[in-house]
Image (cartoon, helix red, strand yellow):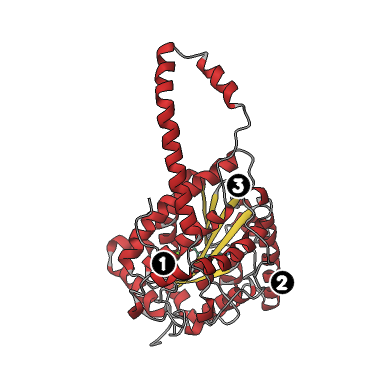
Amino acid sequence: MADAENLWSTDPASALRAGPELDLATLDRSATPGWEGGKGEARAFMADRGRLLSELQERLFAHGRTGGDRSVLLIVQGLDTAGKGGIVRHVVGMVDPQGVALRAFGVPTAAERRHHYLWRVRRALPRPGLIGVFDRSHYEDVLVTRVHGTLDEDAVPRRFDEINRFERQVAASGTTIVKVALMVSYEEQGLRLMKRLDRPDKHWKYDPGDVDTRQEWDAYQAAYADVLARTSTDVAPWHVVPADRKWYSRLAVTELLTQALVDLDLGWPRPRWRLDAQKRRLAATMSAESLRQAAADAEDELASYRQAEAEFAAVVAEADASPSDGRSDLADGGGPTGTTAAPGERKGGNKASKKPAKSRNDGHKRSTDKAERSTAKTKKSPAKNSQKSGKKDGGRKSGGKKGR
Ligand code: AMP
Ligand code: MG
């Protein structure tokens, strides 16, 4: 099942995590932190991950159908052209749409404006078993509103606290929150907008307001910096994804989502009925001929199930052992609130499914384990792309708006 090489040398959960030393002004938005390959390898690996993601999502869905309380929420933020739509199409699009709850947040409607800004967000939260996706989110309420001056500066810290509290509640209710901020550079944004103007088939994507927003670039960067500094918590950390190379941002978000699902450690839910009794009941309704046929198929079905399970387990074990850590060569180690799990904490698995916060921590604890386990693996993976560089500094060295 997994044929493509895993060229992550640093787990994006740690390579991209917003930390106290993150500096958006010097973030290299064309870097590919943690990934030691190029576009071709990324495409192959993403296809593998897509299959895994699909299987994980089916398990999550199955749990939701049988009383489980877990869900995942992917929050995608980024300026115009950063690639939010592409994440939805190319990453989320790899799983069964029946298991996805997608919501794009635009300018609040008159009805929405009559409520608290979190009102529409609460209503869009994923039910158990689903992967919720926010294309923009409540963060617009501390970004665009701030830049436009419709939000009083005095109110900003209060909103940050409110958002952190809200996300803590969401996590405590069983939702793993994955937040990604797609960071496109000023030049690349200009090119992408110009392409929309140059191609009649892209005109529909162009909004004259995008240039107004672009003219406020510095204010948006400052507002984003504040959001990343103030709302990256251990239950809901921000991941800052360089977005000038679309293949990289999609690959990175795929990995973040996959790891979030792997961390849920979901097996197939146990039925709440008795297998033998149900078999007898069904058999009583079938012809002798059909029963012979079913009996002949049964062995194959079981063998096919076992093979699928073995392959799945192997791929998950592989994914779980993905390289991690590597924070030492990044400026921004760890989130501002600190995320190291207490020694001895282990992955919760099904039993700990009531404690998503622990699950996150456990994920990080496991990151440490993974780092230890994967030293050999990391060495093995060839630094094919060292010319793509920026690696040693995590690719955060060059400015996002050169030539302005
Ligand atoms: P798009 O993502 O291109 O469809 O654009 C959606 C627009 O809605 C963007 O310009 C956002 O800034 C804007 N928007 C989203 N949420 C809010 C909000 N809470 N307040 C004001 N504008 C918002
Ligand atoms: Mg737009």
Q: Amino acid at mark 2?
A: Arg
Which residue in the protein does label 3 denote?
127
- Image location of residue 86, percent across then percent down: 40, 61
Which residue in the protein does label 2 denote?
158
Separation of residues labelled 2 and 1 (CA atoms): 32 Å
Decide: is 267 above or below 24.
above
Separation of residues labelled 3 and 1 (CA atoms): 33 Å
Between tags 2 and 3, which lies in front? 3
Contact? badges 3 and 1 (CB < 8 Å): no
Between discs 3 and 1, the one toward the N terminus: 3
Q: Amino acid at mark 1?
A: Asp
Of all residues shown, which one is farthest toward the left?
A: 199
Of all residues shown, which one is farthest toward the bottom?
A: 403
Between discs 2 and 3, the one toward the N terminus: 3
Q: Amino acid at mark 3?
A: Arg
Secondary structure beneath dot 1 equals loop
Drawn side of residue 294 relative to residue 179, left or right:
left
Name the residue: 38% across, 69% down: 381
